[in-house]
Amino acid sequence: MNPMFETLVFPQDARILEVGCGYGNWAAWASVQVPQGAVLAVDLDPKMVDWAGQQYPSPAYPNLRFLQADARELQFEDEPFDFAMSNACLHYLEHPGQAFGAMARHLRPGGRLCVTCLGQGNLRDLFKALERVMQDKDWKPYFEGPTRSGSLADARSCEPWLEEAGLVKMQGRLFNETVTFPHREAFRDWFGSNFGFYFEAVPNAFRGQFCEAVIQSYCRRQGNKGPVRVFRVWLQLDAVKRHQ
């Protein structure tokens, strides 16, 4: 759970919308906090929604529902929500602000939007290592097209989206998180499972070599042995819907 979500206290009758619920763990926890309220948790992946519904069935969580929905195109018949939440999800959009309008549409006036997603500068050094390797003569032919970057959004770039959605920013900040892997093997496993976009550009027979080249480039300042650290950056936004 992120720092903002840890400090939230919900009225027992609060109505909560969670966008990008994933496995449904937070939504299930929130539903227990609002016994006279309700939680609607949505995710774009229908398989994830089915899995969450099986793990947290209605008989055990009568005030919790899971639905498949796109964060940018939310359309519900429900009464307006008191809170619209999203944790570690909206960075998958071209800009997290693309979801603000749909989320705000389902908030009551005075309702609160709370978002945490990966932010500007996330994994900057790792992306630099990737760029160095991709520019090497052995790998450059595989990366002639557009590639992803680690820039992402910051609070200032979200302001026009918040304004258009009728939201008033209460807080917007970037905060850092250090993730430590005990050894290179653990870092290699994490890198291999989270950067598939880059591996897909390389022929299967050479993917192991590509992975090692990036790891060597990234770890050269951290030493050959011992833990490997990566530096994540999170964007945290807290906003309130204007009274009409």
Image (cartoon, rainbow, N blue to C red):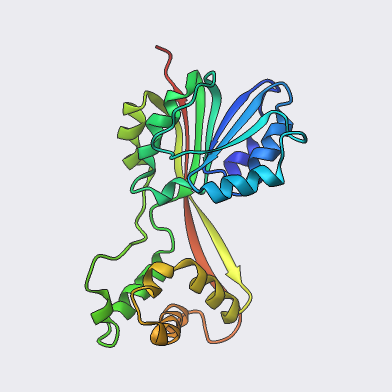
The image quadrant that residue 67 belongs to is top right
When the figure is inspected, residue 35 is found, relative to residue 234, above or below; the finding is: above
Residue 3, horizontal then vertical, whole percent: 60, 44
Q: Position of residue 39 (x, y in %)?
A: 62, 30
Give the image location of residue 124, x and y in percent.
Answer: 39, 64
Q: Which residue is at 27% across, 78% downward?
A: 142
Could one spot residue 174 in this view of the protein?
A: no
Asked whether the viewer can see residue 242, the reply is yes
Left or right: where does residue 185 sit relative to residue 221?
Answer: right
Of 130 and 92, the residue lying toward us: 92
Can you give x and y, in whole percent of width and height, for residue 97 in the image? Answer: 36, 39
Residue at left 39%, top 34%?
73
- x 72%, y 29%: residue: 62
Please tell me whether residue 225 is drawn above or below residue 32 in the rendered image: below
- The single residue placed furthest to the right in the displayed view is 60
**Looking at this view, is 158 or 41 the one in front?**
41
Q: Nearer the viewer, residue 217 or 65?
A: 65
What residue occupies the far top of the structure in this picture?
A: 244
Residue 199 falls in which quadrant of the image? bottom left
Residue placed most toward the observer, 123 or 202: 202
Instruction: Give the number of marks.
Output: 0
For residue 198, what is the image quadrant?
bottom left
Horizontal side of 223 relative to 33 (left or right) equals left
* Above or below 123: residue 120: above
Q: Is residue 13 above or below residue 195?
A: above
Quadrant, the C terminus:
top left
Q: Residue at x 54, y 57 (%)?
A: 177
